[in-house]
Amino acid sequence: MTVYRFTGRNIQGVMEKGTIEADSKQIAIKKLRDRGINPRQIDESKSILHRDLSLGKAMKNEDFVIYCRQFATLIRAGISIVEATHILADQTSSKGLKKALKGVEEDIRSGIAFSAAAAKYPKIFPVLFVNMMKAGEATGNLDETLDRMAFSYEKSFKLKKKIQSAMSYPIVLVILIILVSAFMLLWLVPQFTANFASFGAELPAITLMVLGFSNALKAYWWIFFLVGSAIIGAFLYLFQKNPKFNFYVHYILLKMPIFGKVLQKSAIARMTRTLASLFSSSVPILNALSIVEKIIGDPVIEEVVHKSRTSLEKGSSLAEPLKESWVFPPLVTQMVSIGEQTGSLDYMLEKIAEFYEDDVDRTVDSLKALIEPIMIILLASIVGFIMAAVLLPMYSLYEQVG
């Protein structure tokens, strides 16, 4: 909601000043008149204290998953949408969701449909949620729609967390390797080599190489830092602002060995699960594809979905553009084609989603078991190489003393 500053005369004829929260200027004027105040001047507040900071950021996925499940349970229990919204607004720990739900409750009580009220808060309620709620309101199957949506969000969230867990483990180990290597190069290696040099010992080639890198790192660490920061900053900027760069990054990620297959299967599972939920909720197929195109989060698959929607608009098959793309395996295209022919597309899409969700679960578990020893061997190899550079001069020194 927006905060407005107002100046107006109350029913006693006294001038009042203050602030009021409302979705629009017209609603703010109506609220003031309901309170017996005739507004003379009303403007949006520019103060930082009145900015809706909590709604500036999208809500956490886990908070929204919990909200969907609780909302579905309350509606299934026979509680009205207004009361369910009021209950969830009181008990949620998310400040953004709490404010949004209070605004939605107010709109519902004034006669606005839940889907229309929720659409006013796009950073809280995703476009998929709003459209499925709209379909549920139109068909009268709101409880079934909410159950299906809660299940869909839970599956997507679990799959996402599983992949994040698999990807974060090697990243943490790589950071650990960098920190350990930097410590040894900046502190351990210079101390040992200084002692050996004082004895006049001849340093082996491996030690001279490591010492040279250590000296360069110690003298020009700020250059390494600036160059690294510049590369990371440029990458993030282009990734967010340049659609072509974003597309090619996702393309390369999907083509990666091992991890690319996991990301590809995960994206297929997410897409088919979303489409199945929308079709089951009686959302028209073109609208469903348009929604998936907006929320899929992968421009490579987004391009294929766009081609599929264009194909349907021209009266062709949904499966044709999928067959032409390398992203979708034959299993997906064949089941989609069968679903189109038999009129059971939602069922087929759900089965595809289940298959790939299970496949990703198994693959991620196997990857975790495989990555751990590989990363440990890598860490041991780097540390062992540096230690060899430190220890070899010792043997040379002992031989000279002997």
Image: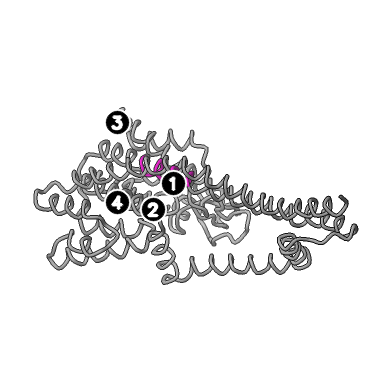
Q: Which of the two residues, 280 or 81, is positioned nearer the viewer here?
A: 280
What residue would you read off at disc 1?
163
- What residue range appears in magenta? 155-166
Quarter-of-image position of residue 307: bottom left
Type of amino acid at the residue the image marks with label 4: Asn
Which residue is drawn at the image coordinates 23% and 45% (left, top)? Answer: 281
Q: Report how far apart the C-alphas of labels 3 and 2 lie in the structure.
A: 35 Å
Residue 54: numbered disc: none
Nearest-to-viewer mark from 1 and 3 = 1
Disc 1 packing (10 Å; few <14; some 14–19; many ≥20): some
Type of amino acid at the residue the image marks with label 3: Arg
Which residue is drawn at the image coordinates 82% and 52% (left, top)? Answer: 399
Q: Mark 1 and 2 residues: CB-CB less than 8 Å, in contact?
A: yes
Q: Mark 3 and 4 residues: CB-CB less than 8 Å, in contact?
A: no
Residue 131: numbered disc: 4
Q: Which of the two residues, 186 or 65, is positioned nearer the viewer here?
A: 186
**Residue 166 horizontal/vertical position (percent):** 47, 45
What residue would you read off at disc 2?
263
Upstream in sequence: badge 3 or badge 2: 3
**Residue 32 horizontal/vertical position (percent):** 49, 51
Upstream in sequence: badge 1 or badge 4: 4
Disc 3 packing (10 Å; few <14; some 14–19; many ≥20): some
Upstream in sequence: badge 1 or badge 2: 1
Please identify the residue farthest to the left as the structure is shown.
342
Q: How many callouts does the rendering have?
A: 4
Question: Circle 3 sits in a helix, a strand or a loop, which is it?
Answer: helix
Q: Report how far apart the C-alphas of labels 4 and 2 lie in the structure.
A: 26 Å
Which residue is drawn at the image coordinates 41% and 72% (left, top)? Answer: 244
